[in-house]
Amino acid sequence: MLHNDQQALDIDALRRGDRAMFTRLVALHHRRLVIVARAIVGEAWAEEVVQEAWISVHRALPKFEGRSSLLTWLYTIVRNEARTRLGKEARYVSLDTFPENSHEDTLRALNMAFRGDGHWQGAPADWHVDSPLAWLENTALQDCINRTLERLSADQRAVFTLRDLQQMELQDICNILELSNSNVRVLLHRARLTLMQVINRYQETGSC
Amino acid sequence: MLRCKDIAAHASEHIDGELNWKQSLGYGLHLLVCGYCRRFVRQLRTTIACARAVAADDALAHDEARRISERVYDHASRP
């Protein structure tokens, strides 16, 4: 079942300490917060960092004034919690699960689509259907997309999650992940191209 | 004049409205005359929409969320 992120989230109820609403907030955002924590602190500590962040969120909610969006506020708390954890831990174990050469493969495949003068070698493959809703009926393709999302590097996945799933402004993403605007753009574009290539392959071969 | 390769390289910035007016103008003119690039940009938009729709159902199961919530409320009730 698909859901709307902000569905039935009553900020006043959250401020009053409504437990059911808090549980709903956790359900809606926990996984995406873990994705962002993973990009900052690595796989080993991400879950624990977000669990700690929920305690901070609960403590701070009565004082939440709504100057930033609830989403930006949540991610900022997780970022701060993650930075604190980084300070405590002497080492940072980067767990990029997608081999770096796979990103290079994606870019190489795209570059090979062009002639020396920068124009297309041939037409980009025509997809059978361009409607996302029609795609969703295809569970095999959904699995491909989910697997690809899981295999993106931690920073690409965090940027993609914040921008394309949470629809956050690029500047807010830069602040949360402490990355430059150009870095965020590159990570986002690579993540999208990787996903696009997977869909393309699925169109041509029927598998990921 | 932008090449198709440039259109592909800056497609995300185009989609996100991050190009300045001059870049947007050049980008738009290229798209007007190049069907291959229009297809590429359309497919990139479709990719984003697909991923968004697939990932929309990533909420925690209620029991899992309740466990986290209970831990938070337990912590808050400690003296």
Image (cartoon, coloured by chain):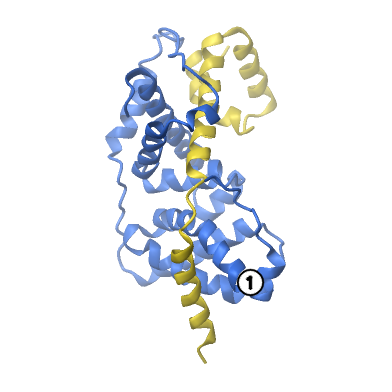
Chain colours: A blue, B yellow
Is residue A83 visible in the rendered image? The answer is no
The quadrant of the image that shows the C terminus of chain A is: top left
A167 relative to A76, above or below = above
On screen, residue A99 versus residue A133, left or right, reads: left
Q: Nearer the viewer, residue A139 or A180?
A: A139
A63 in relation to A30, above or below: below
Mark 1: which amino acid? Leu
In the rendered image, the vertical position of residue A194 relative to residue A88, given as above or below: above
Disc 1 crowd rating (10 Å Cα; few below 14, some 14-19, many 20+) is many
Residue at 31% from the left image edge and 28% from the top image edge: A105
Residue name at image x 56 percent, y 70 percent = A57
Q: Nearer the viewer, residue B78 or A49?
A: B78
Q: Residue furthest bottom?
A: B79
Secondary structure under tag 1 reads helix
Tally of numbered discs:
1
Is A164 placed left or right of A110 in the picture? right
| Front residue (pair A174, A1) | A1
> Residue A90 location, x and y as percent?
31, 68
Residue at 49%, 69% (x, y): give it.
Answer: B66
Residue A182 in the image: x percent, y percent? 51, 39
- Return the x and y of residue A91 as percentages of the image width and height: 30, 64
Chain of the residue where label 1 is placed in the rendered structure: A
| Residue A148 in view here | yes
Q: In the image, what residue occupies the spot 39% across and 68% down? A: A48
| Location of residue A24 in the rendering, given as x and y in whole percent from the top left corner | 57, 63
Question: What residue is disc 1 on?
Answer: A61
Q: Judge from the rendering whether residue A202 lies leftward or rightward of residue A59; answer left or right.
A: left
